[in-house]
Every structure is written in structure tokens, then in C-alpha cells.
Amino acid sequence: MAATAAETRVFLEVRRQLQSALLILGEPKEGGMPMDISIMPSSLQMKTPEGCTEIQLPAEVRLVPSSCRGLQFVPGDGLHLRLQAQAELGTKLISMFNQSSQAQECCTFYCQSCGEVIIKDRKLLRVLPLPSENWGALVGEWCCHPDPFANKPLHPQENDCFIGDSFFLVNLRTSLWQPRPELSPVEMCCVSSDNGCKLEPKANTKVICKRCKVMLGETVSSETTKFYMTEIIIQSSERSFPIIPRSRFVQSVITQCLVQLSSARSTFRFRIQGQDDKVFILLWLLNSDSLVIESLRNSKYIKKFPLLEDTLKADSSSAWSAVKVLYQPCIKSRNEKLVSLWESDISVHPLTLPSATCLELLLILSRSNANLPSSLRHMNSFQVAFLKM
């Protein structure tokens, strides 16, 4: 097997609903070396004067060689072509909360980062989705009498769990372990008075893990706590804590949120913001039916981050389901005008996460973008990325 042939990069994106595929065969390391490429239904074969390399596609992927079209060579990328494809891959998502199987069961809430038990052996009798954030206004429009729900927030009872867009609401009145508010620097707020504005301590509602100090959520009232889905794993008490790489877990939770919201509310643009409403990322969902195959990726020149190391250990020719997104980073006052436009647009849905998780997601998106062939990294003014499901 020749070194040059072995280092040829293959990128394949299959659209399951469209039954089409984009195939990119990277340039050999040594430019100008002739290469014969053969495309077969279940494999790709590349021959050079130094040897032959054959890449077997996953069993669930089948190409139609006779449908090749749009053949072109892109400098710096390699050979681009499109063809028909079939892919039947059942998307196995990491379940955030299985309502049907875990309602009526005793459940344990874990910190996803370190496995610390947050709530132990809680029997949930009701697991209910919360209405949209504008439900109060809709009630006012449709009722011919005064709103019976006015000034009555939806708080869970002892054996309830309410599910929002990116969080759980749980009653902690009888929990064996009570999360405690963060004790680090007390925030100050400005309170108006007769003599002007004076600074007073601001209530700190953050809920942190006792072991790893990660922010898990916020206290909503004296009995109700909001836990963010990206920070908590809810598991049947009969099962042990599942060890899931952080990057994989964050991507799975975010993709579930994006797919569910886009399906339920026909919204495809999102503001990813921290718990203080500071916008970190503007995200545009393009499609959720992609199957991505990357083969023979050379990662030795890519700096490793602990958050992303699990992605580097993946099989070199594995296939994974993904959502394709456009994004704009908004940290350090970037894209302020665009953020202002999206904040005033009612079709853009806010998705609130802990600030640290917003930065983790931005790092994941940036890494995905950097790994794409250069011609696929940008679309108009946005950057392109894939999030694994």
C-alpha cells in the first residue's frame, strides 16, 4: 500500500431524503502523481504508480456509480462529483429523557461531567412538556374571559418533571441531596433610590455540582430548580451511570433540540445564548438527514482539546448521522448588527444554555468547520459545520 495513496482523504456526504451524495477525493500529498479512481456500490478504489488503496463503505451505504455527474477538480480540495446513493442508518440518539419508559419509575439524576448523584431515587409520576414561551399571550387572545392562568407560573409538584426547550423543571422539596447556589463572587445590581443608584448584592441563583463545580442549572423558586439538558443525565435507578464523552453528549442534546424545535415550530434559526441572555452563536439549521463519512483523516497536525479527543479516536471510515448548520460566532462583540437583527426577529428562536456550554458548542462547531474540505467551509457570510446526532 503506497503512502501517497493511503494519505488521500475521502469525504462523502449522503443526503438520505434526497438519495444523493457529494464525494470529494482529496489531492495526493505529492501533487501531479497520476491516480485511477474506481467507484463501486460498496467501495472506492484509488490506484497510483506506487500502489492501490481500497476503502470499504459502511454496509448501510450504497452508491450508484453510473449516476456520476458534476465532475470537477477544485484546487486545494481535489476531485468533486455528485452521484445517487442510498443510505439507511437508524439514528441512535442519546436519550435525554424517555418519557414513556421512565415515567412511573424511580430515576436518578447525574451530573453528566463527573457522574455525581444530584437527585437519587426520585419517582416521577408525571413527565410533561411545557408550552411555548408565548403561551400566556395566546391564552389572552383566545379566551373571552379573564386569563385564569395570569400570574400563575407552571411549577412542578413533588413527583413531576416538566420539560422545556433545553431544560427540566424539578421540585426539590424532598430530595436527599439539595444543590447549593454558587458561592463565588457575589454579583451586584443597581437599585434606584431617592438619592440615585446604589449597589446591592444580587441573588445568585446558579446551581453547581458539588464535585466538579460545573453549573447544572438555576433555582426558579424555593422549591423548583431548572436543570439544563446539556448538564444532566436522567437514568433509571436500576442502571449505572453511563459514561458518554462530553463532546458527543453536547452534540446529541443540541441536535435533538434543533430537530424537535424545527419540526414542531417550523423555525430554523436559533440564538444560542447564555443564562444571562448574552448571545454566543447564531445558528441556522440547513438539514437533518445527512450521513457523513470521513476516511483516512490525518489528525496528527491538529491540536487536541480534551473536549474533542473522543472525535479523534473514531474509526477512520465510520459513518455518522449529522445535522448540517450555518453559524456565526458572536463572542468579543462580533456580528453585533446581525445579533440585533436576529433578536428583533420573532422567527428566530432563543436556546438558553450555561455560558460554559455555549463556548463548548462554539469550539465543537469550529473544529467541525476546520475539518471540512476548504470549499465547503463557508456559505455566503456564514461558516458551515456538522453536529453529530
Image: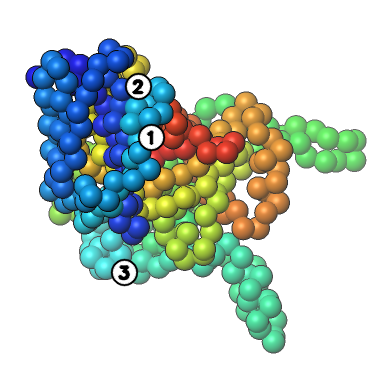
Disc 1 secondary structure class: strand
Which is nearer the N-term, disc 2 or disc 3? 3
What color scheme is it?
A: rainbow
Label 1 Cα crowd, 10 Å radius (few <14 / some 14-19 / many 20+): few
Between disc 2 and disc 3, the foreground one is 2
Disc 1 marks a residue whose amino acid type is Gln
Whether tag 1 and tag 2 are in contact, CB under 8 A, the answer is no
Label 3 Cα crowd, 10 Å radius (few <14 / some 14-19 / many 20+): some
- What's the mark number on residue 110? none
Q: Quadrant of the N terminus?
A: top left
Q: CA distance from mark 1 to mark 2?
A: 35 Å
Percent coordinates x, y for residue 29 in the rendering: 28, 15
Q: CA distance from mark 1 to mark 3?
A: 59 Å
Percent coordinates x, y for residue 143 in the rendering: 66, 83
Nearer the observer, 178 or 53: 53
- What's the mark number on residue 125? 3
Q: CA distance from mark 2 to mark 3?
A: 41 Å
Nearer the observer, 176 or 86: 86
Whether tag 1 and tag 3 are in contact, CB under 8 A, the answer is no
Residue hosting label 1: 72
Residue found at x 48% / y 50%: 285
Residue hosting label 2: 305
Percent coordinates x, y for residue 364 in the rendering: 40, 33
Residue 370 seen in the current view: no
Residue found at x 17% / y 36%: 38
Nearer the observer, 318 or 364: 318
Residue found at x 39% / y 62%: 161
Whether tag 2 and tag 3 are in contact, CB under 8 A, the answer is no
